[in-house]
Structures are given as C-alpha cells and as structure tokens.
Image (cartoon, rainbow, N blue to C red):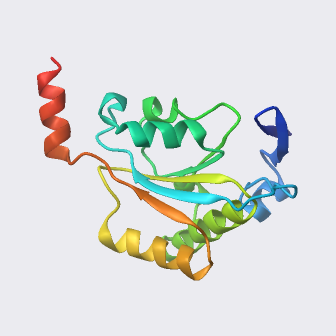
Amino acid sequence: MLHCCISGGRLLGLLPLEGPLAQAGGGIASNPGAAMKGKVYLMGAGSGDPDLLSAQAVRVLRAAEVVLHDDPVSPEILEFVPASAQVRNVHKLGLQANSLQEKVHSLLIAAARDGHYVVRLKTGDALSAAQADDETVALAEAGVDFEMIPQAGSAVGAAAGANSR
C-alpha cells in the first residue's frame, strides 16, 4: 500500500506504508525533483494544549512536509500538520535509545536533503540541552539547515492557561 505525498498540487513522492520498502528507508518519501534544500525545525510540543503553542510553532507545523515526533505528542498538536505531510512516531521504530537517536538523525538528514521541510517534534516545552546538542551537531555536520523554534516556558503557559478560564 502506498500513500501519495502532495504539496502545492505537486506530487512529492510515494510513501510505502508497510512492507520492506517502508522498513528499509524508515518510510521517508524521496523528492528527487526538489530544487531547493529542505530545512529541519526542532521544537517542543509544549504542554499538549494547542492554544499555548507559539504562532511561529503553528506556522511551522502547518508548512511541514515531514514530521518526526516523540511518543506521546498530543493529537491536537498534530492536527496542525497538513494531511499531505508524512507523520512518523519515531518511538514506534522499535529501536534502543542509541540506535533510535542515530535513526532519527538519519531520517532528519535524508528528508531535508530530499528538499522537505521537516519538523522534529519533541514532547514537553523544549528540547533538553543534550537532545538539542546531539541533533544540532548531527544536522550541522551533515550541512543541513535547521532552526530551533522557541516555546513559551511552562510557567508562562500555565499562567496563560489560568487566565483563559
């Protein structure tokens, strides 16, 4: 079974949903005709309340072509992602921590090199320093353009949530 990845009315590629092709490449569809380099956006999913995401985070999610997220990420947050985007829960790859992180790096780099706008969506308000350093180093060493998307701190988010009631 294949899933079509379409952006702006243009076919980006076919994504195998199951079978050896999906497993071999991690399920990242290629975009051989991409004229520009992709970009990776590293961001936290916040408290899980979509109303507390920054406007920049919402814009990035709405433009995403590939989203690699942790488990759990609120389904309400993932609703911002276009239906044409490829969304993958990286914890369902079934790998141990070190192997998983290497696979995530590989998927981020491959998707960006294929010209996709990629979101690495982590649980919580922000990436931990170790995770951010690990992922930014891998992306920088690979020559992949990336950006960290700041989130409101949990205290700010809690205050905003309390004031909205």
Viewer-proximal residue among 144 and 16: 144
Q: In which quarter of the image is residue 157?
A: top left
Q: In which quarter of the image is the C terminus?
A: top left
Q: Which residue lies furthest to the bottom in this view?
A: 141
Is residue 163 positioned above or below 113 on the image? Answer: above
Is residue 141 positioned above or below 100 on the image? Answer: below
Residue 18 relative to residue 44: left or right: right
**What is the x, y in percent for residue 82?**
62, 32
Viewer-proximal residue among 21 and 141: 141
**What is the x, y in percent for residue 161?**
18, 28
Residue drawn at (67%, 40%) of the image: 85
Is residue 107 positioned above or below 10 on the image? Answer: below
Residue 33 relative to residue 111: left or right: right
Residue 113 relative to residue 148: left or right: right
Q: How many marks?
A: 0
Viewer-proximal residue among 24 and 109: 109
Residue drawn at (15%, 36%) of the image: 158
**What is the x, y in percent for residue 27?**
74, 54
Viewer-proximal residue among 14 and 142: 142
**What is the x, y in percent for residue 14?**
85, 45
Residue drawn at (60%, 44%) of the image: 64
Q: Which residue lies furthest to the top in this view?
A: 165
Is residue 62 positioned above or below 97 on the image? Answer: above
Q: Quadrant of the N terminus?
A: top right
